[in-house]
């Protein structure tokens, strides 16, 4: 069975523009994957008011930041105070979060993951969550604005290009190895680092 999963960044949009984007793409459920679902700069996206606003527009809200967030409480996911995406992806809690997303898709929701960053290249929703959800059964589309949606395969190509990675002429490595290397580099670049 083929499913489509969307992602979106709330960024500094107005809540009206955000809801309009969700309606434009027929989203019926939003999975908030921010570890901390609050913002001083953009309080319109704080968990409780956002959930109420979505409900008033017939969009379901679920918080999955504990399972799929980039700042896990599990200390084994950190090295020298930096969250390591590969370690997060290996936890039972993260895998449970992925299963909850898949279950929502199987139930027929038009589902979007939501985090703060506008560009998915700078966000764990693409570098961690979508990296572990991509495959033949799920087509991932990143909502950039009303007219622009980037397929995950195009995002991967953009990532490789932006990191200026090229195949090694003397290696028999597959193109997929280059993409995995790009994920690793970008994941390390954007990973959460504890203060102090």
Image (spheres, helix red, strand yellow):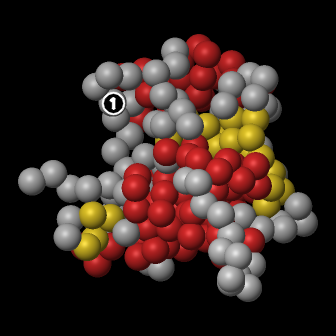
- The residue most toward the right is 1
Left or right? Give the position of 161 relative to 151: left
Q: Position of residue 11 (x, y in %)?
A: 48, 28
Residue 126 versus residue 114: which sits nearer the camera?
A: 126
Nearer to us in this view, 65 or 150: 150
Quadrant including the C terminus: bottom left
Looking at the rendered image, the quarter that the N terminus falls into is bottom right
Can residue 191 be seen?
yes
Q: Secondary structure at mark 1?
A: loop
Of 127 and 92, nearer the camera is: 127
Say above or below: 164 vs 22. below
Horizontal side of residue 137 vs 88, given as left or right: right
Counting from the top left corner in percent of width and height, residue 147 is at 78, 23
Above or below, 4 against 183 in this view is above
Question: Which residue is denoted by mark 1 in the rendering?
Answer: 39
Q: Residue at x 39, y 30 (%)?
A: 46
**Residue drawn at point x = 38 percent, y = 40 percent:** 37
Residue at image position (33%, 73%) is 77
> 62 or 16, which lies in front?
16
In which quadrant of the rendered view does residue 72 lie?
bottom left
Can residue 61 be seen at all in this image of the molecule?
A: no
């Amino acid at each position: 069975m083929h499913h489509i999963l969307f992602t979106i960044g709330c960024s500094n949009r107005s809540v009206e523009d955000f809801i309009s984007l969700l309606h434009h793409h027929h989203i019926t459920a939003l999975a908030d994957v921010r570890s901390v679902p609050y913002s001083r700069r953009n309080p319109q996206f704080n968990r409780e008011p956002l959930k109420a606003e979505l409900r008033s527009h017939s969009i379901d809200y679920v918080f999955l930041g504990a399972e799929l967030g980039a700042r896990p409480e599990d200390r084994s996911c950190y090295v020298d105070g930096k969250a390591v995406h590969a370690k997060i992806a290996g936890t039972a809690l993260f895998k449970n979060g992925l299963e909850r997303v898949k279950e929502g898709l199987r139930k027929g929701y038009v589902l979007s993951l939501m985090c703060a960053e506008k560009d998915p290249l700078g966000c764990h929703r693409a570098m961690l969550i979508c990296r572990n959800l991509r495959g033949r059964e799920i087509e991932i589309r990143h909502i950039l604005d009303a007219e622009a949606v980037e397929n995950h395969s195009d995002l991967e190509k953009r990532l490789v290009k932006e990191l200026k990675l090229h195949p090694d002429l003397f290696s028999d490595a597959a193109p997929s190895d280059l993409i995995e290397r790009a994920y690793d580099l970008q994941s390390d670049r954007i990973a959460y680092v504890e203060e102090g």
